[in-house]
Image (cartoon, rainbow, N blue to C red):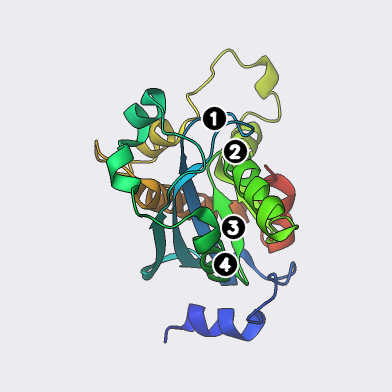
């Protein structure tokens, strides 16, 4: 086992959140993405979940999570165009309730990372409240917010006066940071792209004064 994983196991208990004083390079992260039947948290539902683990800045290719689920609400043509999941593909798939415990176990001991993570969390929290009477408890960091914070630093905190406004969607930022994106995608592939983006950010953050988990959570809150 490599040195990063040894440090991770030393600092994180099996069923605990990471120590906030832990250096960002020694933390376990789970980078997550969901595919949805639509964007309305009251009317739509989760159709797939993908996640990949990281030990510090290293993506652990052997530690992934991916499940398609039979959605609580019908797939609509607008969402099918985005994620490509057809109704026939989810027939016979488990409900979100059947996979939720496995997802939560995968996230234990980690900071959970995602791009525009507030949307994923809204849907997860809806299902957790309905099925388990509680909310998602792991600490979270949003690469969208992280990118905005880093841009503010590079512009001297004057971004509100800057005429240039970059595209902030995942694939635009992936292109900016030279991360390869294929035409087809699913929740796991998008989580892997987000992990690569987060990997780039982790390499820049110490020079900007972000050295601990506490520092990261402060600037990357969804």
Q: Residue furthest front?
A: 92
Q: In this view, does 141 lie to the left or right of 32?
A: right
Tag nearer the camera, 1 or 3: 1
- Residue positioned 59% across, 57% down in the render: 112
Label 1: which residue?
39
Q: In which quarter of the image is residue 222?
A: top right
Q: What element carries label 4?
A: helix
Instruction: Give me the C-alpha separation between circle 1 and circle 3.
Output: 21 Å
Q: Which numbered disc flags the more N-terminal residue, 3 or 2?
A: 3
Can you see residue 102?
Answer: yes
Q: Nearer the viewer, mark 2 or mark 1?
A: 1
Sequence-earlier tag: 4 or 2: 4
Q: Name the residue under label 4.
A: 101
Circles 2, 1 touching at the beta carbon (< 8 Å): yes
Name the one closer to the observer, 149 or 185.
185
Residue, disc 2: 119
The answer to whether the residues at label 3 and label 4 have Cβ atoms under 8 Å apart is no
Gap between marks 1 and 4, in whole Å?
Answer: 23 Å
How crowded is the residue under tag 1: few (<14 C-alpha within 10 Å), some, or many (20+)? some
List x then y, in percent, for residue 142. 60, 45
The answer to whether 170 is drawn above or below residue 17 in the figure is above
Mark 3–mark 4 distance (CA, rounded to whole Å):
15 Å
Report the residue marked by disc 3. 112
Callout 3: helix, strand or loop? strand
């Amino acid at each position: 086992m490599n040195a990063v994983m040894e440090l991770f196991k030393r600092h994180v208990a099996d069923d605990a959140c990471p120590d906030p004083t832990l250096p960002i390079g020694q933390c376990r992260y789970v980078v997550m993405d969901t595919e949805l039947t639509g964007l309305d948290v009251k009317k739509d539902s989760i159709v797939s979940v993908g996640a990949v683990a990281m030990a510090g800045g290293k993506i652990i290719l052997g530690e992934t999570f991916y499940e398609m689920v039979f959605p609580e609400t019908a797939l609509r043509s607008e969402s099918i165009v985005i994620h490509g999941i057809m109704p026939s593909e989810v027939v016979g798939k488990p409900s979100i309730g059947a996979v939720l415990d496995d997802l939560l176990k995968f996230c234990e001991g980690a900071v959970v990372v995602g791009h525009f993570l507030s949307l994923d969390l809204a849907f997860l929290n809806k299902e957790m409240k309905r099925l388990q009477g509680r909310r998602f408890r792991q600490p979270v960091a949003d690469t969208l917010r992280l990118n905005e914070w880093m841009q503010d630093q590079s512009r001297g905190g004057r971004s509100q006066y800057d005429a240039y406004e970059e595209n902030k969607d995942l694939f635009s930022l992936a292109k900016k940071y030279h991360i390869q994106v294929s035409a087809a995608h699913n929740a796991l592939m998008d989580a892997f792209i987000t992990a690569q983006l987060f990997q780039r950010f982790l390499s820049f953050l110490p020079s900007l004064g972000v050295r601990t988990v506490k520092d990261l959570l402060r600037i990357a809150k969804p």
